[in-house]
Amino acid sequence: MRNLLLLFLVFYASINSMAQKVAVSAYNEARDTPIDEMLNDRSFEVKFLNQQNLDPFLRLQRMEIGVTLPLNVNGKVRNFIDRYLSDTNYLINPYLEWELKVEARFIFENDTLNPILVDGFYIQNYQSFMKNPLPEPKNGAYYTDEEYFKLGGWRKLENQFPFHIRFAPPKAGSWRMQIRIQTADDLFWSPIFDFYVDESENHGYVQVGENKRFLELDGSPFYPVGMNTPWPETAPEFDSTLFSYNIIKEQDKTWYRPEMYRDKGFCVPRVYDKYKDVWSKMAESGVNYVRTIMNPISTEIEWEKLGDYTNRLNQAQEMDELLEFAEAKNLFIHWDLAIHYTFKFNVYYLTQWDWIDNDGTPSYCYKKAFNLERPIEFFSNQDAKKYYKQRLRYIMARWGYSPNIAAFEIMSEISNIGSTADDNNEFYNKNTQVFQDWQIEMGDYLKSLYHGKIHLLTASYSGEMSQKDSTFFKSKSYDFMTSNVYDFGTPDFAKFFTKVVAKRLLNESEKELSENAYNVRSSEKSGENVFSYNIKPLMFSESEPIDCVRNCERSGIEINRSQWQSLFSGLAASLSWSSWYKTDNYKVYGQMQKWISTVDFLYGDWHPGASELYDGDSLKRWNYNANYAEAMDASWRKADLSYMRSGQKSEAIGVLTNKTYNFYNTDTCVTIPVEIQHLLKREAVNLKKQKLQVKGMKKGTYQIDYYLPENQEEPIFTSVQTGRNLDIDLPSIAATKEGYIVLFRVGWHSKR
């Protein structure tokens, strides 16, 4: 019997070796049955889960491949997942690649020199449930934590294939696939499987355009027009019923207790459903881009237990469904992979998910596992970094296939970490090198993974990044730059977009480097300045005219003003933080999308109106021009201007706004700030002759057409002018919600 067993093992080893060289295509006979059916305890099954017939796969269509585990390996994984045993000799953690790595190797058209390697991920299936209708609170007023978390939840379902592999083939043609399973002391191979991929009309991945200023999709301009939808949460605009049951009234005090302030629990499934409803309304209105953040109350996969995501796999399934929903609605996601307040101290009155653990709340698993005292230690501890990379690996394996993820953001507002208050960057400035090194290391790791390579990557800062921080400048892993910038100076936004954005953030002039933290670096060499340029798109991933938002603006006047002007500022995008609460205002984003789509910002060397195009070397730089900026904004003017100019200086497109029609004289719940009383302490009036100009055009005759945002087909006024500097003046810029924003387009005038 022993000899027979040895003979069988030798025979199996021979067959297993041959399987790596010989293609197996038996799945063509029955795609809905397991492909691999070896009969000994080293066998495992592979199945294409989302293909139920013999039709070929489509280019950039998700392939969902299920993988079982060899019996011995599966038993040890189950011991870990179900907590049957504590002896590590009988446990395998399926989330850590040094304990178990399931990997698919894809080869296109026999190109064995360039295989695509994709990690598998451990998965559990769930069915969500909710009480419907919602029961009234027992106290007649609000839900206690115990009541809230009993409103709904998730039930585990049978799961035949504990590992999945997701892959979107980037090319049409013949492919081969082989699955490799490796434990700490053993290695298993599947046979090689052939499959064919047909061409499709599926869109590809968002990329940085050739001009390094804007984004592109499949060779066409892609301009993100959208907003932050930070995380699933209850709000009166989304779910008035559940919101009303979260209003707490006790001892003459009234406050709202959102999900993130409830102890030891997640959002109930209803909250995710309402979140998708909001995305649906946005997509229908013309929004194409949303930013979401992995938050401990919702889609975070690792918080309580280090390197163990088991108790959060239901949250991961909710993220699956959110991503599939975005794909169906053609929404692109800017996905922030971690929330910064985990590394802060009781900020926003939040105790449950912060760094402090001596207040009766759970401790962050990294802090507990490695005895970290201060947040900065997380970013320098080698073991913490090792485990955090596994978290990134899981994220890329499970969701990185999707072309509807436009970009990954490594962590929100790293410059806010460690501080005791919001927007206090002192801690960041003292530890810039540590944060920079961590971001570069994590970015390089993420880009080492196939799903990381195919996506854009960025980092996030609260306000402007420090000049000492060279993350964007040094690292090739980061494709574009982001900062979260608030308080544009309501309603005088043209001043902000000329003096801050054009003069400092996007200024590539060698003469004005002292304040530029993003694009230019200089060094002394033999008594001369040596300049280096870092041209990458800059996005405000959070933005807001904060004065008005904090003071209960209801109408969205200033958000609309700032969003329209940002389109022509040279930024790759500017995403409002508060717009998602203003559901009646979503239609404005459709108007923005329609207007911006008429310009090909990828080509033609378009540049901001406050800049001139410097063409003295191979790089066409944007150099700030004070004379141009002055014609767009001055504090005494009652209107301002934002526009882009073509490289040939023969076209321009932009927006004109009436500053006298503003939040402060249309709402009554705020006091006018002293510093802007000269602008705002007046009635809203119709305007004319504001002496605003589009400057720097090629000498010639131009036609200027003016439109209202809601009607971009029929101009409300047209003028013809000759010269290099063109007056932007309507007979009257209205002081109404429908007329305080006016669009314009400048082009060559054809004499008839």
Image (cartoon, helix red, strand yellow):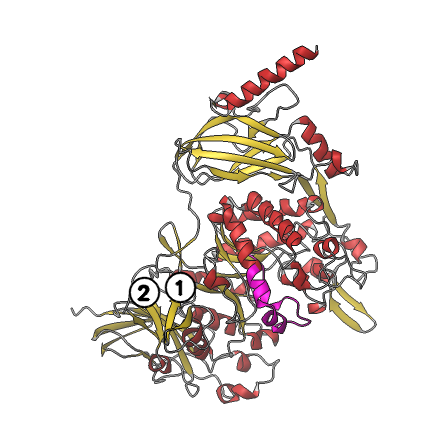
Residue at 60% across, 30% down: 187
Name the residue beneath numbered marker 2. Answer: 619
- Contact between labelled residues 1 and 2, with CB atoms less than 8 Å apart: yes
Residue at 59% across, 28% down: 188
Q: Up-down: is 45 above or below 600?
A: above
Which secondary structure, mark 1?
Answer: loop
Name the residue beneath numbered marker 1. Answer: 535
Q: Residue furthest front?
A: 526
Q: Is residue 368 visible?
A: yes
User: In this orientation, which residue lies closer to the viewer: 80 or 151?
Assistant: 80
Q: The magenta stretch spans which residues?
A: 410-437
Which secondary structure, mark 2?
Answer: loop
Label 1 neighbourhood size at 10 Å, few (<14), some (14-19), many (20+)? Answer: many
How far apart are labels 2 and 1 at the CA level? 9 Å
User: In this orientation, which residue lies closer to the viewer: 448 or 211?
Assistant: 448
Q: How many marks?
A: 2
